[in-house]
Amino acid sequence: MTLTTLFSDFVSAITFTNEVHAEEAAAEQQEEVEEVAEETPEEEEEEEEDEPVDPMPRLMEECAETPKCAPYKHHYDECTARVTGAQEAGEETNEDCVEEFFHLVHCTTQCAAPKLFAELK
């Protein structure tokens, strides 16, 4: 047996051993992934049930319909309709409804804040 043959036999033995371990490791990892995938939907359902719902958006929508904030909502809706109509017609407009939006948000926030903290207590 020559030195070259001995060396090539040694390299092939090492390579063969690594391939077997790699295949075993890949199979074990695949099994772990499948186990985690089976457990994940149950855990996600539990997290969804435990996660609290933010009442602020609901309160702000309710406050936007109150007599106090209704004029601000009306002005904002008119402005957005005007701007959207101009954009769809291909007209350029400098109007952006930011002022109307801030007035509406200020009113709804002022209305919703006391209700929010009452619900959170």
Image: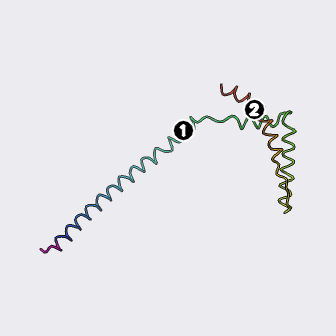
Using residue 32 as the reference point, say whether residue 84 is left or right of it.
right
Query: In the rendering, at what x and y percent does residue 64 appear?
Result: 80, 37
Of the image marks 1 and 2, the number of the one nearer the N terminus: 1
Q: Label 2 neighbourhood size at 10 Å, few (<14), some (14-19), many (20+)?
A: many
Which region shows up in magenta? 1-5
Name the magenta segment's main secondary structure. helix
Q: Quadrant of the C terminus?
A: top right
* Amino acid under disc 2: Ala
The picture places residue 62, in percent across and down from the top left corner, at 78, 35
- Name the disc covering residue 112, or none: 2
Question: Which residue is rendered at x = 71% and y = 30% of the image?
Answer: 116
The answer to whether 35 appears left or right of 4 in the picture is right
In the picture of the structure, the residue carrying the numbered disc 1 is 47
Up-down relation of residue 90 to residue 102 (above or below):
below
Residue 36, above or below 109: below
**84 vs 101: above or below:** below
- Residue at the (71%, 38%) spot, across then down: 57
For the residues bearing labels 1 and 2, Cβ distance under 8 angstroms? no
Circle nearer the viewer, 1 or 2: 2
Q: Position of residue 13 (x, y in %)?
A: 22, 65
Q: Quadrant of the N terminus?
A: bottom left
Taking 40 as reference, is 83 above or below it? below
In the image, farthest residue toward the left: 1
> What secondary structure is found at the residue carrying circle 1?
helix
Task: Name the residue located 83 percent from the left edge and 59 percent from the top edge.
Answer: 87
> Mark 2 falls on what kind of element?
helix
Residue 11, percent across and down? 23, 67
Give the CA distance from mark 1 to mark 2.
Answer: 27 Å
Q: Tell me if residue 114 is in the magenta stretch.
A: no
Pick whichever, 41 or 52, lies toward us.
52
